[in-house]
Amino acid sequence: NPRFQTRFWRKTYQLQRDATEIELAIDQGEVTAGVLATPICELELELKSGDARALFHLACELAESVPLTMAVKSKAERGFELLDGGDHGVEKAGAIEVSPDKTNAEAFRSIARNGLRQIVANTPAVRDGSPEALHQMRIGLRRLRAGIALFAKMLAGEDRESIKGALRWVTQELGPARDLDVFMADVLEPLRAAHPDNAEVAEVHRDFTTRREAAYTRAKDAVCSDRFRSALLDLTAWIETGAGADGDNARSGRFAGGPVAAHAAKQLARLHRRVKKRGANLRELTVDERHELRIRAKRLRYATEFFVATFPGKKSAKRRAESLSALRDLQDSLGVLHDIATRQALRAEAEGGAFAGLPGPDMADEKKQLKEARRAYACFIDAKAFWKA
């Protein structure tokens, strides 16, 4: 017997828009695995010939009448989710193949599609309230924003600013839920376990549970909104039909068609300098400056992961592994320091009365993490540039 089955009927329509031919297919049915089932209600648009922009114009017109939601998972993937219990799966970032012979436009499109998939694939689980899916969607948003920054030279214009604004809005809507997840997991849950009969601790826990529920409602409202659905369609259209594909002028057009390896090396060197400069006096940095260093390290790590295939060879692989290891360690230590600062801010916000039960700042842990960050930074400086011969 099959582990899962897909049963659906399909109706297709051939549409002609000027010189563009589009096939519209509607699938309705269900995927079943034992007693579990999930409905199939999909609309697919396929460009048969002509201008891809016409396809996205049609998609946007349809979305004005029907609340269409972008989807990237196949029917088979949904079947395997049923076998795992029926919950919507959480998707981490997939590998990217940016070979050295790709153009800048092709490389950007590969990176952008990768980030878009991570965002869209985690949307159903975020709507279900999954903390891990929310975390992975935030990573997808950051990776996509990092990719846009890497290719800003060919992405100038109002469309880019509109896309950046939409991505920034989604990030802001998800942020409070993630911050409260970390605070509750790292502080309040251990505190409650250590003091199960303490009424003040219980009150603190109830208060922050309520805050987290409100933050998740805000996040879910965002990803269920027409604004979010529209943003995903606009983003997909921009990646596939705009985003510097032809260039806004002759100069950006030449850049878009140029080889990615030279541009990747230049961007990696620039990001490396920014991390090196900001981390030079790590011990003296303020909380905000440490956070800025963490962001810079994260952007360099994403760029390094994007361009793995751009610089092949054993020597490059060894250097890249050393650099990535140091960057991850630096980012982890700075992340813990940022979480400590966030906990201190939340504690200060809730100071007094019943909230006196919250633990104070852990200075020993802060010193330990700062020491680890300095060690990781030293390893980062020692690592050789993998993008150089």
Image (cartoon, rainbow, N blue to C red):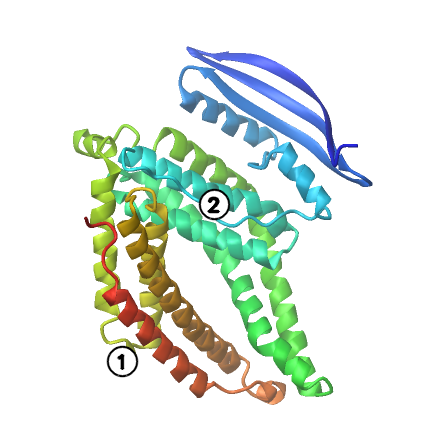
Query: Residue 66, relative to residue 297: is it above or below?
Result: above
Question: Could you say where residue 266 lies in the image, as x and y percent from the top left?
Answer: 20, 48
Side of 168 where 382 appears, left or right: left
Question: Could you say where residue 106 lies in the image, as x and y percent from the top left?
Answer: 33, 33
Q: Amino acid at mark 1?
A: Glu
Task: Assign the N terminus to one quadrant of the image.
Answer: top right
Q: Amino acid at mark 2?
A: Gly
| Gap between marks 1 and 2 measured at Cα | 37 Å
Question: Could you say where residue 14 lies in the image, as x and y percent from the top left?
Answer: 56, 12
Q: Which of label 1 and label 2 is nearer to you?
A: 2
The residue labelled by disc 1 is 284
Question: Could you say where residue 15 lies in the image, as x and y percent from the top left?
Answer: 53, 13
**What secondary structure is marked by label 2?**
loop
* Residue lying farthest to the front in this orientation: 314
Of callouts 1 and 2, which one flags the residue occurring earlier in the amino acid sequence?
Answer: 2
Residue nearest the viewer, comparing 135 with 201 = 135
Packing grade of label 1 (10 A; few <14, some 14-19, many >=20) is few
Query: Residue 268, relative to residue 312: is it above or below?
Result: below
**What secondary structure is marked by label 1?**
helix
In which image quadrant can residue 204 be found?
A: bottom right
The residue labelled by disc 2 is 94
- Verify CB contact (< 8 Å) between mark 1 and mark 2: no
- Residue drawn at x 66%, y 17% as measured from the top left: 11
How many numbered circles does the render carry? 2
Residue nearest the viewer, comparing 342 with 34 = 34
Residue nearest the viewer, comparing 210 with 196 = 196
**What number is the disc on residue 251?**
none
Side of 373 where 264 appears, left or right: left
Side of 219 where 374 appears, left or right: left
* Residue lying farthest to the left in this orientation: 251
Query: Residue 113, relative to residue 355: is it above or below?
Result: above
In which image quadrant can residue 277 be found?
A: bottom left
